[in-house]
Image (spheres, grey):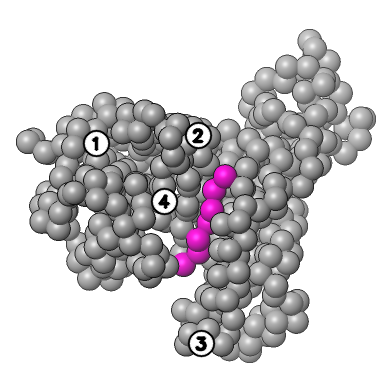
Amino acid sequence: MKLCNPTTWLALSLACGVLSTASEANVDNNGPLNKVAVADVHSEEETLASMPVDSFVEFHEVTVTIEEAPERPSPRHEQEKKNLLKRMSKSHGKWDTNHPRHRLLEALFGFSRYKPRQMAELDRYKGLYKHVSKAQKAVLEKTVKYSQKFETAEQLLDLNQQLCDEIVETALEFYGISHEELADHSKAKDNAGQAADRVSTSQALKHFVRDWSTAGTGERDDAFPCILDTLQTLFPDRSSRDIKILFPGAGVGRLGHEVAGLGGFEVTINEWSMFMNLAYRFLEAHPRPGTKALHPFVDSWSHHATTSDMFRGVSFPDRRVNASSVLLVEGDFTSAFKSDKGQYDVVVTHFFIDTARNIMSYLDSIHALLKPGGYWINFGPLLWGTGPFVQLSLDEIVAVSKSIGFEFVDGSEQCGGVTLQGEKVRGKEAVYGFNDKALTKNAYSAQSWVAKKAQ
């Protein structure tokens, strides 16, 4: 990472809120950074303990545009907000653990308890360190100041908790939930001995990296060009009308925003996970580039080349979030759009279909939502989750899709080589790991196809 000039550094630092004083960071055009650790340039492990916590931030050059609050919601955003709040009412539907308000409170509970849940694991590490002999500890402390890692990690967890608290406050305002209601829910969970969801909270935070930071560019570039090129090939002229496109399982929404940026698409995204939805609502409320940062890798001590890699921070978003260009509809894909049959020109399933409990319900919903002649574009793996009713191989998905009225058409070469001989299905490697500096790589042979609904 290179800082082009002091102006770039100052703008980024002010935007991220991490430049403490001029004495902590001296920058000139030719000289090195003084006392500020950026993961790309700092490799002296033994000095980590003496560095200020807020220096573990990885800065990336982004365009910072000073603008006002988020764009005014469009009429369809305003209508969906009314529909959402109606669905969130306790009196709407059956009150159980699947009720959207209950799932919302669970996510709020998770974010509000981020640090305590992470500290349980950090305390376990501290306990394990006690089993190391006194002589071995002496070597570790003299060489790498190992105990200081615990202290630094806890301080960084504090910073992440501050971000989580912001996410909670943003959500309470957006959804109209009182602090008292959340406190009552949290107390009930504590009394029942039920801990907050640590994994879902951590995964949602890491999606800021994958979707909305320059550190996630590589992973996005594995998938997005295939989908974007396919859409522009299918719809080269969008001047006469907007193409209605739906992205189920959209996470925190970057792909939808990339498509909206092409122009001529009316983009709707959908997500079941309230943890992801809270993260997305936070982005809607804080759209300016580089204004937020987190330390996403401090909760895992494996696969790091350097300790500074583990402790580094990542700023986000890397581009302005134009919330008015994309509509989020929360809820279960198979039920949230029942009134929208035959309304969409395109449904894009990106890392989604293998999340199905019942893949047949997904296929039926996709087919029902598309207009005659509409397109289903898929890109992703076939990693079936826990307890799926049906687990299909690739050739079976192709056969079943044809049987319900889909015709497979040629896809973009950006989507890789042909996977099944005689079929119009392509595959390419796609990394899914969040951490581009990790000493391990999680990648899939992601399968892509374009299927047209019969007229």
Q: How many C-alpha atoms fall within 10 Å of the one at disc 2: few (<14), some, or many (≥20)?
A: few
Residue 309: give x, y in percent of width and height.
60, 37
Q: How many C-alpha atoms fall within 10 Å of the one at disc 4: few (<14), some, or many (≥20)?
A: many
* Residue marked by disc 3: 95
* Discs 1/4, front: 4
**Residue shown at the point (67%, 34%) measured from the top left:** 58
Mark with earlier residue (3, 2): 3
Q: CA distance from mark 4 to mark 2?
A: 16 Å
Q: Start and end of the magenta stretch?
A: 325-333
Q: Secondary structure at mark 4?
A: strand
Mark with earlier residue (1, 2): 2
Q: Secondary structure at mark 3?
A: loop
* Residue marked by disc 4: 247
Residue 174: give x, y in percent of width and height.
68, 65
The amino acid beneath tag 4 is: Phe
Mark with earlier residue (1, 4): 4
Q: How many C-alpha atoms fall within 10 Å of the one at disc 1: few (<14), some, or many (≥20)?
A: many
- Looking at the image, which residue sits at the far top? 30
On residue 427, the disc is 1
Q: CA distance from mark 3 to mark 2?
A: 41 Å
Q: Quadrant of residue 165?
A: bottom right
